Image: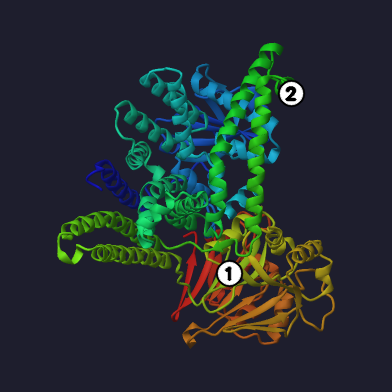
Amino acid sequence: MGIRRPVCVFSLLFVLILSVLMLLYDSSDSGRQSGRYDGIELGVEGTVKKIENKNDKSVIHLKVISETDKELSENILIYLSNEEFKRAQLHIGQTVGIRGRMNLFRPAYNRGQFDMREYYRNKHYSYVCYDGHVENKGEAYNHLKDALYRIRLRTETVFEHYYSERYSGIIKALVLAERSDLDEDVREQYKNAGISHILALSGLHIVTMGFILFGGIRKTGVPKTPAACLATGCTVLYCIMTGMPTSAVRAMIMFLVSMGAVLLNRTNDLRTSAAIAAFIMLVINPSYLYEAGFRLSFAAVIGIGLVYPSVRVIVQYLFDRNRVLRLHRSDKRMVRAVMALLRTLLFSLSLQITTAPLTMWYYYQLPAYGIIVNLLVIPLAGILLAGSLITGIAGNIVLSMSAAEHGTAVSAVCTASGTAADGLCRISSLLTSGILRLYDLVTEGANRLPGGIIITGRPMAWQMAVYYLTVAAAVLMGYCLMHQEQRLRRAALRQMDHRKYGTAEGISALRNRIVRYLRIRSAVLICILFAGSVVLFARIRPGYEISALYAGQGQCIVMHGEDIPSVMFDCGSTDVKELGKYTVVPFLKYCGIGKIDTVFVSHLDTDHVSGLIEILDMETSGIAIGRIIIPEGDVQISSENYMPLMKAACRRGIPVYTLAGGDEIEYGRLRLTCLAPDKSRNTYEDLNEGSLVVSVRYNGHNNSDNFSALMTGDISSAVEDDLTEGGPGEYDWLQVAHHGSRSAANAWFIQTIRPRVAVISAGINNRYGHPHEETLELLKESGETLICVTSEAGEIDTVISRGKTEIRKYIH
């Protein structure tokens, strides 16, 4: 197979060598930014590469012109207010001078969190400016790209008029690769159902539409060469208009290769054209190799071009290939329909075989019913794209006609009703809206089913390598199986002259031997694939792990491990928006945690509970919560967060309990004892005073694995005095109270518990100055305490396994 396709072999070797080189390059810090312009107001000059129009801002992608400063010779993302953008009247390809405060992109501070800095670094963007101001601009610009940009804006206007707000966002993402207007609920709904690929510009559909256009032009009598040039030109212009996303670039190159094969009267081969596309893309920009879109896109192509033919043959041999082929050619329509459905199911399974590991790597979950949902969705995707394109093209015609009549395009769509183009737009938009409505019904139904999301966690790199090697081996042996069948049948023909096989019984026995041989080999290959899947899904976890997440000016601590249920202490922040959605839930999924057995809320201040309320409101997050425990006392009921928490828990059917000093909970090897609030006190002055204080004792498999932690919420030094009088004992791990405030720690308390590790949750550059220097000095006086602050280290993990305790900081 490789000798017959040398381009595939060459491209594969090139990708492997490039991967090793980029891995070595990435391990060094040579490509890292110094960040010396971070927070500095700067004037930059560059060329406008791309313009995005958001609700209240316009985003300019600027290619900076700098011959001396390497850090400023890359791209910069600049946000302009809509008023500033209208005043500047910028065009694609125009040289402009812009002034504003430069900022580094936000990095990830926790596992599972999206690393915006790394994402844009791979795209060669160095800084982002949120308050740009245009100082000067040139006259010249790229007329072709700017015209395509204007067409794109007009097309967006068309979609906004003919579709609802929800559906127009989906259509823009599908047709124009514009995802800024896509509803977050739609994005999450489609992702959980396993059809998020619908929300991306499909490379397969671009190629298909290109060939349809080529065939249509040929039917008008245009010779082959001009027709191929016209179809290719339209495809290239369309890809440029959409901003050249990864899937569009791949599809464009594959279509060019396919058109070349047509002109040269050569057979068009999917695997060869995909290999050429990968080679060209990586030569132009090696950073494509880091992009999730590139990996998923080519993984899908490999699933279609390599895995599906092999898996189909393996399954056919498992059930006797001749019998399967006879069923495909059956005279009964119902039988043929069932076989076609099974073939589609096998096609969808082949895509999952190649893309599932990458989905687990980037999203930490798999849709349980994704294969079935795709059976209903994929057949209509082509109709959806075609109908949307018709709406866009016809709508642009309506705009042009109305502008010619009225001399302006303002509200032009509204005045063009009654025209043939407008009628076509309404019919096509009605059809596509119906398809999207069906998609909504299917995805909502799938998401409501029990176990709709499988929280897998992120696999290790070696697990993915082993899995893909087993898939490659199974696929290769599947192709070899076809050649073995041919050899066996040729050998059987040579034995027909022998007396033993001269009879009908002998021929049947020989055939049965061949079928049995191929069936056994097919079963072995399926077992190999299953073994690879077992390796991929296996998770090696420590016995006990406690993770203090970076939650800005807030707190979230999660205890989890092989020997204990998952327990969370607090989940809130005052300065990190949507903490639950973008920080806590991704972390839990990254670790493979699908259920939090108990959530302890130290008190009901916003910086300790806002994220929990948000997670409770996220019904499709895939994270289950067993129960919630809050401190006993009237002061907590008076909090503004009390009723929102109660209502959100009630909607999810989650019980809420109160806890006070002396109460105790046991989970196997884990024992949690409540030390405060004091039951004898009916009232506390404020929420902080009435915080839960929980003693955590983990009894490992041996004494060296034993571990203790103390959760103190936001208690004051006065409450610490009360705890000290009760003799709380020594602890290995301490959550320093009140984010390290000077009012929440005293020397007597620290000397009594003698923590080996003291963790402080505080936000970067927070307005309170936490942690205070007095608290840090107090912790340093012991000389034995390791002080870890989330604002400096990001997520802080304490791992206890096999008699060893390890402290891991996400940011070194």
Give the residue number, with chain letter if any, for mark 2.
414
Q: Quadrant of residue 233?
A: top left
Q: Position of residue 476 (x, y in %)?
A: 30, 55
Q: Amino acid at mark 2?
A: Cys
- Tally the numbered discs: 2
- Coloring basis for residues: rainbow
User: Is label 2 in a helix, a strand or a loop?
Assistant: helix
Q: Residues within 10 Å of mark 2 (few under 14, many from 20)?
A: few
Q: Is residue 222 found left or right of 592 in the rendered image?
A: left
Q: Quadrant of residue 672?
A: bottom right
Mark toward the start of the polypeptide (1 vs 2): 2
Q: Residues within 10 Å of mark 1 (few under 14, many from 20)?
A: many
Would you say the residues marked 1 and 2 are in contact, meaning their CB atoms lie under 8 Å apart? Answer: no
Q: Is residue 567 above or below residue 332?
A: below
State the CA–CA distance, disc 1 to disc 2.
Answer: 61 Å
Q: Nearer the viewer, residue 231 or 706?
A: 231
User: Is label 1 in a helix, a strand or a loop?
Assistant: strand
Q: Nearer the viewer, residue 274 or 743?
A: 274
Residue ID at (51%, 48%): 333
Q: Which mark is residue 338?
A: none
Residue ID at (50%, 40%): 202
Q: Position of residue 178 (x, y in %)?
A: 58, 36
Q: Is residue 572 found left or right of 791 in the rendered image?
A: right
- Residue 41 in sight from this viewpoint: no
Q: Which mark is residue 759?
A: 1
Q: Position of residue 559 (x, y in %)?
A: 58, 72
Q: Position of residue 569 (x, y in %)?
A: 65, 70
